[in-house]
Image: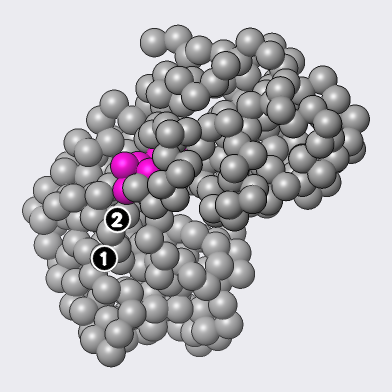
Amino acid sequence: MSAPHVSAPLVVLGPPPEGRGGYAMALRVRDTLGGPGARTLNYEHFAPRDLQRARAIWTFTAHGIRVAHSYAPEVHRVWQWIAETPSYDLGIASIADAIVVTSERAAARVPAHLRGRVHVAPHGVEPEFAPASAPPAGVPHVLSVGSGPAKGGALLARVAQSTGTRTLILGRDLGPIVYELAGTYSHIQPRWAPHAAMPQAYRSASVFAFPSSHSEAHAGALLEAMASGLPIVASDTPDHRELLGDAAILLPARGRHAHARWCEALTALMADAPRRAALGAAALARVDGRTWEAWAAAAAKALP
């Protein structure tokens, strides 16, 4: 399926390259929807002249709308504003001609007076993320991906401390507890990896853990793990339930019993190869058809 393109010059306002997931998504929007001459700009640093020829703008946040509008308010009426994950600052979201979200649950969270502008386009996943052709070599380990303390690295590091399971946490700014424990326990390994290294990181893992304290409707790391055929243990949130269904083990990421339940679940799963295989196959089945071409076809319905 060929992806439709925006007929007018498209500018994608996205995060800087160090924002791994968001930056990769900005490039994907540019390449799938933009056509010739499309550009990606860092919404924190760009020159006003960069927007002069734009007649369509895709921005990921209300902040992106605010920034662009402040530079060229006289032409905002002819721009196509699309907020992928709107934060619903009503004064800003009301500027958008269309709001594109990734799930029905996310659509339901849009204020009622804006829902006529909402389009649902579930994210795709790159074809590089695919199951390993053979069981992973090396020491079995748990993998987690995500930057910032909210991704649950501290909980996972404490679980690894208790269970002794080798645990690889890929991300930045994971919080002091993660780095303190890693300094004492060599099997806890926080590090950063570029996007190009991620497919192999998933294929090398035994289990994927996602103890995020946020309910994420478009968690790229979960989609990548699902496409890689990994068994998943994730935080039990409404968005994760919609995405994963019964193809994962869902546990609370907070509360007095969270640590014990994560220890029990990961220990049992690491020791149960048949269940890992069954969960991995179920996760893979749930992302069947989640291509970027399918996403582009759905997202293009919001475009002029």
Give the answer, above or below, for where 157 lies relative to 81: below
Query: Could you tell me which secondary element the residue under label 1 belongs to?
Result: loop
Q: Position of residue 223 (x, y in %)?
A: 36, 44
Query: Could you tell me which secondary element the residue under label 2 belongs to?
Result: helix
> Mark 1: which amino acid?
Asp
Q: Position of residue 48 (x, y in %)?
A: 88, 36
Q: Position of residue 197 (x, y in %)?
A: 53, 44
Name, please, the residue furthest toward the left. 274
Q: Position of residue 213 (x, y in %)?
A: 40, 70
Range shown magenta:
100-107
Q: Is residue 247 left or right of residue 167?
A: left
Instruction: Note whether residue 67 is visible.
Output: yes
In terms of depth relative to the viewer, which is nearer, 131 or 99?
99
Q: Which residue is mark 2?
A: 240
Q: Which residue is mark 1?
A: 236
Instruction: Note whether residue 191 is visible.
Output: no
Q: Is residue 304 left or right of residue 257?
A: right
Q: Residue at x 54, y 53 (%)?
A: 88
Q: CA distance from mark 1 to mark 2?
A: 6 Å
Q: Residue at x 79, y 27 (%)?
A: 75
> Mark 2: which amino acid?
His
Q: Residue at x 19, y 72 (%)?
A: 265
Q: Are marks 1 and 2 in contact (CB under 8 Å)?
A: yes
Quadrant of res 237: bottom left
Name, please, the residue furthest toward the bottom. 256
Q: Is residue 248 left or right of residue 297?
A: left
Q: Is residue 141 left or right of residue 186?
A: left
